[in-house]
Image (cartoon, helix red, strand yellow):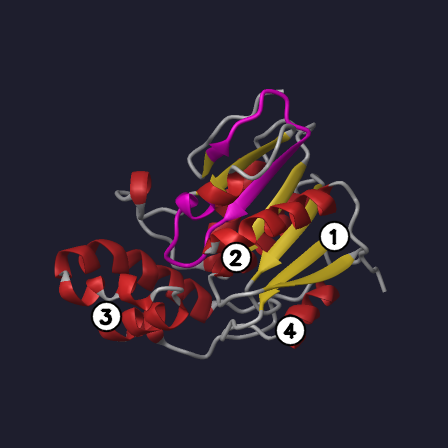
Amino acid sequence: MTVTGTTWLRELKSDPNPSTVLVCFPPGGGSVTAYRALAQRFGSGTAVFGVQYPGRQDRLGDAMVPVLTELAAAAAADLLTWPREVRLAIFGHSMGATVAYEAVRRVEAGGREVSHLFVSGRPAPAFEVTGRLHAGPDADLIAELERLSNDPESVRILREEPSLAELVLPAVRSDYQAVETYRHEPGAPLRTPITALISTADPTTTAAQAEQWRDYTETDFDLATFPGGHFYLDLPENLPAIADLIARALAGALPGRSS
């Protein structure tokens, strides 16, 4: 079975005959390269793709989409073009977790099953972001990126290099607009099992907020915690355990609770 890339989907790890295709939704301001290191942690039988939002990297010339549900709908439309025998699993971090959830809603509505949804570093969908960073000055966006970064020094170059900021910040601003204007439309819970991932020092998501993802599936739910801040996924020491968690969930080896 061959699975190929599309306008919205980029291959990060190929497999000649995958039993599962894991599709990863990047965080706000991010691109498919956010998952390059994680993708290489999976062995034979798993292919990994990333969702490439418009307005960055090879889609730099495409108009950005500042509406979260429109991002989800476009990605889901491409997922629905893949052969029906493809076993899908979906992962999203931060903004990507909410986009992934909304995409799964649409994939299910299109008559396709998703084997598992992994949501990382993000409160459950009913949580409303009240900030207005997307409407503020560049300096405020940069300060927020510094606050969340594992290495704030790496972000400060945006203050010193205006040409770099002009390249990077429009996508960040668009994604913050998508997050800050998103409002969850209630509906039936997913038929897809959910695993929520959080970290010990994430200023954006508490364990109690992550636990609320349980209400968005009618089947199994699990919660896992890792050391680090909001971008704990970028810490090399966490990658083996994260990949192992995903692999065990896909193999049906997590405890999971449906109550």
Q: Determine which of the numbered discs, if any, sits on residue 212 in the image.
A: none
Residue 156 lies in magenta, yes or no? no
Q: Residues within 10 Å of mark 3 (few under 14, many from 20)?
A: some
Q: Is residue 25 magenta?
A: yes
- The span shown in magenta is 11-35
Q: CA distance from mark 4 to mark 1?
A: 18 Å
Q: Quadrant of residue 60?
A: top left
Residue 214: x and y in percent read 73, 65
State the residue position of label 3: 138
For residue 193, the mark is 1
Q: Which residue is mark 2?
A: 93
In the rendered image, which quarter contains the N terminus? top right
Tell me the amino acid under the disc marked 3.
Asp
Identify the residue under disc 4: 207
Disc 1 marks a residue whose amino acid type is Pro
| Front in this rendered view, residue 214 or 146 | 146
